[in-house]
Image: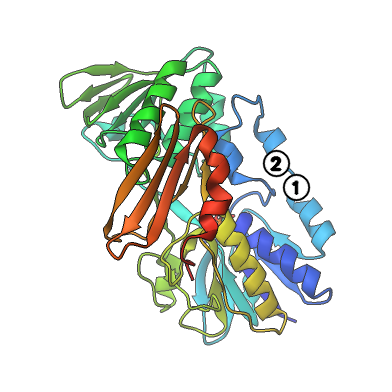
């Protein structure tokens, strides 16, 4: 009996397993995962420190508890090294072979590597799963100095969280304001002011030219001293396993509206997948993908439909919600409001609203505005 094999126990893999078990009480499901198989909410990683939550508190369920609850098998600490599509069989790094009738890749994304002169002599952390978080949290000293590389969504969230928890955070980013790719200047400046107000020290419009143990030299000659360094400069979908198996990959593993790869027996979802709307590395799209794919795997082929889905940025210093326009969309931002409460609408060249960003009290409008936006798929 081969059944459905899911590679990955993140929100993508486990959401799919949960939906599939709900629709089909009997189908055989196996999850293979390189990590410990704990069920946890990844978005909490950039909000947990200020709430006093450590790794044990973040792990909501052990792999064994997931197995018992969903009546499936979870193979932990095992990496899939090859997919034999002709034989419909996986090879694990321990040598075990696993057969599948349908295979789902829910293998996530890798943090983009940060390289600069001297970086090979300095530990620059990234946090993209529970294991990373355990290592990162382990060495933080009370009131320590943190160098945060990147002021995007995850960098800004960590800056807020770590500062609230008493760390002294310096953020370096070549962009002139935080969330530079998601927000127009007015909102970005407001976010920088709010985070500055709780103690975050920004070096915006600046790059690091050299890293040495305990110090970063910036392109204006300034030196930032630090105890620990964290890079948050983006994620790259994991495509190597799929590419080696001959599946079509681009920025991510290319899937159609049924989350099907170029092999009809192999599917992909979550951070590793590239849908018709591009890679969508957020929780709400992933949940919609899991629901549609579960229905398909349970015998009811179901197309993915995705409305516009706003992302709430976890920066309590200034609440922000964004619904970014598609990459490369032509148009202009129209900003209204003042101070912390701003509304920015991204109006396309044809006059249609293609995206928005909200801050402060106006974030309450995100659901109603999202309904006015074009569907993603
Ligand atoms: C700090 C942080 C905060 C975030 N906050 C938000 C937020 O507020 N809102 C939001 O919408 N999104 C947020 N996101 C994004 C969101 O968390 C992700 O989109 C989502 O969790 C991705 O889930 P996934 O299952 O696709 O990938 P992952 O959770 O990365 O899971 C990948 C799984 O694949 C396994 N794996 C990989 N390769 C192999 C292999 N070869 N063999 C076996 N197993 C393998 C891994 O071990 C892992 O279990 C955040 C992300 C981060 C990092």
Front position in the image: 370 or 266: 370
Image position of 161 (left or right of 116): right
> Residue at 43% of width from left, 23% of height from top?
194
Image position of 126 (left or right of 166): left
**Marks 2 and 1, Cα distance to the nearest angstrom?**
7 Å
| Residue 143 versus residue 22 in the image, above or below | above
Q: Are marks 2 and 1 in contact (CB under 8 Å)?
A: yes
Q: Which mark is residue 119?
A: none
Identify the residue position indicated by label 2 in the image: 59
- In which quadrant of the rendered view does residue 365 lie? top right
**Label 2 CB-ligand 1 distance < 8 A:** no
> Residue at 59% of width from left, 45% of height from top?
42
Per the image, label 1 sits on a secondary structure element best described as loop
Q: Is residue 309 visible?
A: no
- In which quadrant of the rendered view does residue 229 lie? top left
Front position in the image: 276 or 251: 276
Identify the residue position indicated by label 1 in the image: 62
Q: Is residue 251 visible?
A: yes
């Amino acid at each position: 009996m081969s059944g459905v094999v899911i590679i990955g126990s993140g929100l993508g893999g486990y959401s799919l397993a949960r939906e599939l078990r709900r629709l089909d009480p009997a189908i055989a499901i196996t999850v293979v995962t390189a990590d410990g198989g704990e069920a946890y909410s990844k978005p909490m990683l950039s909000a947990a420190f200020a709430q006093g939550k450590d790794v044990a508190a973040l792990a909501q369920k052990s792999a064994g508890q997931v197995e018992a609850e969903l009546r499936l098998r979870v193979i932990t600490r095992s990496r899939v090294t090859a997919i034999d599509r002709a034989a419909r069989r996986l090879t694990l790094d321990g040598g075990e072979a696993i057969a599948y009738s349908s295979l789902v890749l829910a293998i996530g994304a890798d943090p983009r590597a940060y390289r600069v002169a001297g970086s090979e002599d300095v530990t620059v952390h990234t946090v993209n799963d529970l294991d990373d978080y355990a290592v990162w949290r382990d060495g933080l000293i009370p009131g320590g100095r943190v160098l945060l590389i990147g002021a995007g969504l995850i960098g800004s969230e960590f800056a807020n969280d770590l500062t609230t928890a008493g760390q002294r955070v310096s953020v370096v980013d070549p962009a002139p304001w935080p969330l530079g790719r998601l927000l127009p200047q007015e909102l970005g400046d407001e976010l920088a002011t709010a985070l500055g107000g709780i103690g975050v020290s920004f070096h915006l419009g600046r790059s690091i030219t050299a890293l040495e143990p305990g110090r970063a030299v910036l392109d204006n000659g300034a030196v930032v001293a630090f105890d620990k360094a964290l890079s948050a400069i983006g994620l790259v979908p994991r495509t190597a396993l799929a590419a080696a198996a001959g599946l079509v990959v681009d920025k991510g593993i290319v899937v159609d509206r049924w989350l099907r790869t170029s092999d009809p027996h192999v599917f992909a979802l979550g951070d590793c997948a590239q849908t018709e709307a591009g890679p969508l590395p957020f929780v709400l799209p992933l949940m919609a993908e899991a629901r549609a794919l579960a229905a398909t795997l349970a015998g009811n082929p179901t197309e993915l439909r995705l409305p516009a889905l706003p992302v709430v940025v976890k920066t309590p210093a200034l609440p922000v919600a964004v619904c970014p326009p598609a990459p490369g969309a032509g148009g202009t931002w129209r900003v209204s409001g003042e101070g912390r409460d701003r509304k920015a609408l991204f109006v396309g060249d044809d006059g249609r609203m293609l995206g928005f960003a909200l801050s402060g009290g106006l974030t309450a409008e995100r659901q109603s505005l999202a309904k006015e936006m074009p569907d993603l798929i």
